[in-house]
Amino acid sequence: MRSLLDGSHVYRAVMTERRFSFLLRVIHFDDSTSRLEHHKRDKMAPIRKIWNMFVKRCQENYKPGPHITVDEQLIPFRGQCPFKMYGLKVVMACDADTHYMINAIPYMGKGSIELPKGMTLGEMLLWRLLSHTTDEEGQ
């Protein structure tokens, strides 16, 4: 285990370090038979389903307040990933008071998001992040 600050003490209570390392090596979230086909269309294909489930649960289980902030975050990541530089770049919409994540879009590099004509990348990300937060009256 790397550090007590990263929550590894929890894993020690449940399993040995050897078992934890083994699980990290062998766990996969995608279908190896269709992996190449999916990677051509979506660089995030191996974890797309889990990512979408996570974001959906965040949205279902929290009603944000009136103040929402949008910013990008670089999540440290040591694994292999076709779109990481120094980590995974994620653009997030969070409740300004509680810092709870409401929505998030992983940024996979230039050209990974198709932009409508006349819209900048920032406008598109803002629109996609906040489109689900309006109520029935559009507020």
Image (cartoon, grey):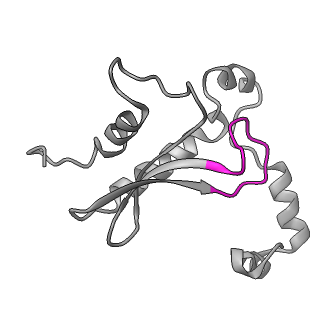
Q: Is residue 80 magenta?
A: yes
96 displayed left or right of 47: left
**Residue 42 place in picture, x, y as percent:** 61, 27
97 displayed left or right of 35: left
Q: In this view, does 81 lie above or below 36?
A: below
Q: Is residue 114 above or below residue 53?
A: above
**Residue 136 place in picture, x, y as percent:** 12, 45
| Quadrant of residue 112 within the rendered picture | top right
Instruction: Check the image and name the residue furthest to the right.
Output: 18
Instruction: Check the image and name the residue furthest to the left.
Output: 137
Kindly identify the residue that appears in the image at 73 percent across and 35 percent down: 82
Number of numbered discs overlaid on the protein picture: 0
Q: Is the magenta stretch mostly helix, strand or loop?
A: loop
Q: Nearer the viewer, residue 50 or 105?
A: 105
Kindly identify the residue that appears in the image at 32 percent across and 63 percent down: 62
Q: Which of 44 and 121 is in front in this view?
A: 121
Instruction: Point out the stretch of residues depicted in magenta.
Output: 75-88
Kindly identify the residue that appears in the image at 35 percent across and 58 percent down: 69
116 displayed left or right of 36: left
Q: Nearer the viewer, residue 12 or 66?
A: 66
Location of the N terminus (image quadrant): bottom right
| Quadrant of residue 84 within the rendered picture | top right
Q: Does the magenta stretch include residue 16?
A: no
**Residue 36 place in picture, x, y as percent:** 74, 22
**Residue 45 place in picture, x, y as percent:** 63, 33
Kindly identify the residue that appears in the image at 36 percent across and 44 percent down: 129
Q: Which of 33 and 4 is in front in this view?
A: 4
Q: Is residue 31 above or below residue 2?
A: above
